Amino acid sequence: MQVRCLSLLALAASLVNSTPSNERKTCTIQASGTNVTDDAPAIRAAFKECDRGGRVVFNPVTYYINSILNITGLQDVEIDIQGKLLWSTDIQYWLNHSMSVGYQNQSTAFILGGDNLEIDGHGIGTLDGNGDYWYEWIRKQPNTSNYPGRPHQITFNGLTNSVVKGVNFLRSQMWTMSIIHSHYSQFQDILVNNTGNRFQSWRVANTDGADTIFSSHILFQNWTVYNGDDSIAFKANSTSIVLKDSRFYGGLGIAIGSIGQLKGVSETVENISAENIYFENTLHSFYVKTWTDDQNGYPPNGGGGGLGYAQNLRLKNLETKGMRGAAFSISQCTRFKGAPGQGNCTNSQFQLRNISIDGLKGTTKSGRVASLQCSAVAPCTDIELSHVDLKFENGTSAKSYLCGNVKENKGWECTGKVCEGGSATGEC
Ligand SMILES: *[C@@H]1O[C@H](CO)[C@@H](O)[C@H](O)[C@H]1NC(C)=O
Ligand SMILES: *[C@@H]1O[C@H](CO)[C@@H](O)[C@H](O)[C@H]1NC(C)=O
Ligand SMILES: *[C@@H]1O[C@H](CO)[C@@H](O)[C@H](O)[C@H]1NC(C)=O
Ligand SMILES: *[C@@H]1O[C@H](CO)[C@@H](O)[C@H](O)[C@H]1NC(C)=O
Ligand SMILES: *[C@@H]1O[C@H](CO)[C@@H](O)[C@H](O)[C@H]1NC(C)=O
Ligand SMILES: *[C@@H]1O[C@H](CO)[C@@H](O)[C@H](O)[C@H]1NC(C)=O
Ligand SMILES: *[C@@H]1O[C@H](CO)[C@@H](O)[C@H](O)[C@H]1NC(C)=O
Ligand SMILES: *[C@@H]1O[C@H](CO)[C@@H](O)[C@H](O)[C@H]1NC(C)=O
Ligand SMILES: *[C@@H]1O[C@H](CO)[C@@H](O)[C@H](O)[C@H]1NC(C)=O
Ligand SMILES: *[C@@H]1O[C@H](CO)[C@@H](O)[C@H](O)[C@H]1NC(C)=O
Ligand SMILES: *[C@@H]1O[C@H](CO)[C@@H](O)[C@H](O)[C@H]1NC(C)=O
Ligand SMILES: *[C@@H]1O[C@H](CO)[C@@H](O)[C@H](O)[C@H]1NC(C)=O
């Protein structure tokens, strides 16, 4: 893959397969047909056989995944998903065996990576985490979100110059997908539905739609996400990312972070754009969360003291229906609940700068258009808002812009002091 489009608007790869489909070696995976027999060995064998210039086909049947899959280093492979991959319900197995994602002490059930891959679900191919079992189980645990070993459904690691399209991701065990060390790739026509059949998705924490880490030049287009946490989140070293033409239901909206969790470590988020996004019943449309400067414990549930910045974040044409909280929110007070001393909400060294939202309209249940709680040590600068028109159901405009330590605001005035307090979801 030689052609790299560097423009922000056309940054993902245009896939150029070196081998035409009909000349490819094809590995069609036979399914066992029963969840008593693990289909993962057959899947591993097919990817081994067709890992260079091949084509791997999942038939229109159910494949039972009872063990971890770590499939990386593929080269020029078409992955044709016509059926469903269904993960097993053996929670104890997954807690014991899920693999490291490589960030925040997070874990995963499936690692997939390679160069020049085309993964096509044709709108029907489905990955199903069998999350009903996880949602039921996590509610009974002391750590209801970041339970050690609770796996992401899939982690794209080392995915480059690739396309993932027309795939449905249902009821993820935890985050739906982490995208790490991946570049020049696009994810389009994706449905994430983490609505539980036994519990409503908004009651289940950490069912993120997608999270990017150490990744760049990624395009997300035409996503639909139903979940109970970040609709999509850009974390450490996510740069040159475009999100467009997407719809988010019930979750927290577009997130930056959490970030700044690792003491003394520098991380950045830069050149992110989001355009034409519809939010229904989400908590925010856009929010940023950074840890405080006080380190307490280690990830995933503790941390703090990180360095770095998020800059050049541009959002355009956002439409809301029944927004539940501040449409735009910043909290620099993510901190570990169990720790003594609690941490100081205004001492983060992580800086937020050059953020603009142009076009934010629709209905809200909150009077707060913005709630921006920034650091006194590294204040938020250059925050611009334009074409804002948020209304309550009765037609009255939402008018409150709360802030602390914001400088160089453009197109809006601060109307009051923001609440300073611990927060994992953007407001205290
Ligand atoms: C197999 O399916 C049955 C029925 O849906 C379910 O009760 C059981 O937990 C499943 N077993 C595994 C290992 O996924
Ligand atoms: C998981 O690990 C625990 C503790 O080491 C062990 O008791 C249990 O048998 C393991 N279960 C599975 C399914 O691997
Ligand atoms: C996955 O497989 C790759 C290649 O064999 C290996 O380098 C990596 O350590 C494995 N990852 C995990 C988490 O086991
Ligand atoms: C968006 O993706 C969905 C599948 O999730 C598909 O049905 C629809 O046709 C796509 N829309 C466009 C405009 O491509
Ligand atoms: C999402 O899943 C829930 C639970 O199975 C289902 O009721 C709902 O229709 C699904 N939504 C979409 C858009 O597929
Ligand atoms: C993340 O970005 C920062 C700032 O550019 C850099 O110092 C750091 O090495 C990067 N981390 C990784 C793991 O790439
Ligand atoms: C972000 O965009 C600016 C302006 O287009 C560019 O100069 C800069 O190198 C980009 N940063 C990264 C990390 O790609
Ligand atoms: C993972 O957790 C362990 C134990 O809490 C901690 O020592 C380690 O630093 C953590 N690793 C990362 C990368 O956060
Ligand atoms: C819950 O999280 C805390 C903090 O990370 C950790 O010390 C504890 O071991 C966890 N408990 C369980 C049951 O995972
Ligand atoms: C602010 O970000 C925009 C992209 O969102 C970029 O074009 C512009 O150059 C940035 N301004 C500064 C002063 O860096
Ligand atoms: C929190 O940190 C800021 C910045 O260092 C400092 O000005 C402030 O006094 C601290 N607040 C408390 C309660 O310690
Ligand atoms: C409209 O609804 C808001 C929020 O419930 C309320 O504060 C406001 O007073 C209402 N305005 C009118 C004119 O009824």
Image: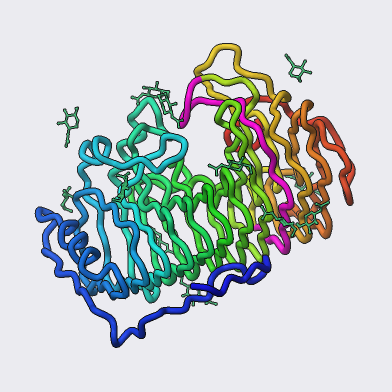
Residue 304 is a magenta residue? yes
Residue 60 placement (x, y as % from top left): 24, 74
Residue 209 seen in the figure: no
Left or right? Give the position of 262 relative to 321. left
Residue 154 placement (x, y as % from top left): 37, 53
Left or right? Give the position of 384 relative to 275. right
Range shown magenta: 297-320
Q: In the image, is residue 422 above or below residue 389? A: above
* Residue 389 vs residue 373, the one in the foreground: 373
In percent of the image, x 39 and y 44: which residue is there? Answer: 174
In percent of the image, x 61 and y 59: which residue is there? Answer: 241
Residue 386 placement (x, y as % from top left): 83, 57
Q: In the image, is residue 241 above or below residue 424? A: below
Query: In terms of image quadrants, where is residue 85?
Result: bottom left
* Residue 193 vs residue 343, the one in the foreground: 343
Q: Residue furthest top?
A: 340
In percent of the image, x 35 and y 45: which residue is there? Answer: 108
Residue 55 placement (x, y as % from top left): 28, 75
